[in-house]
Amino acid sequence: CGGKIMSKKLYEIISKVMKIDISSISDELGPKTIENWTSFNGYVLLNELETGFNVKFTIDEVIDVKNIIDIKRHLTNKGIKLDE
């Protein structure tokens, strides 16, 4: 339970770190489509996600992220429920 809240939390973290409006975030967006998604902000986002969801990402998972769907997949694999 709490899936919608977790997805909202994910979007809120992305919105805060990347300084974009939460309503403009979609699962297809990622480092190539979000202008502020620099390597530094990617690191900040990773840190915020790990803290916010109490998980740790491996380097392979980090490298694998091409869009928000990938982040959701890795969170789901760690037992975080993100159902829309």
Image (cartoon, rainbow, N blue to C red):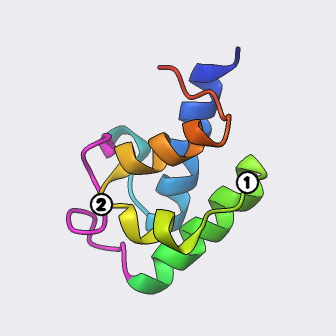
**Which residue is the site of mark 2?**
66
Left or right of 46, for residue 31: left
Number of residue marks: 2
Circle 2: residue type? Lys
Callout 1: few (<14), some (14-19), or many (20+) C-alpha neighbours within 10 Å? some
> Which image quadrant for residue 77?
top right
Left or right of 21, for residue 61: right
Mark 2 / mark 1, whichever is N-terminal: 1
Majority secondary structure of magenta residues: loop
> Which image quadrant for residue 32?
bottom left
Front-most of residues 10 and 62: 62
**Which of the numbered marks, if any, corresponds to residue 55?**
1
The residue under the point 37% across, 63% down is 64
Judge whether residue 35 is colored magenta: yes
Say above or below: 24 vs 36. Answer: above
Q: Residue 21's x, y, as percent?
A: 39, 50
Say above or below: 11 vs 8. Answer: below
Q: Residue 37's x, y, as percent?
A: 36, 72
Magenta residues span 24-38
Q: Tell me the SS state at disc 2.
A: loop
The residue under the point 26% across, 72% down is 35
Q: Residue 2's x, y, as percent?
A: 69, 19
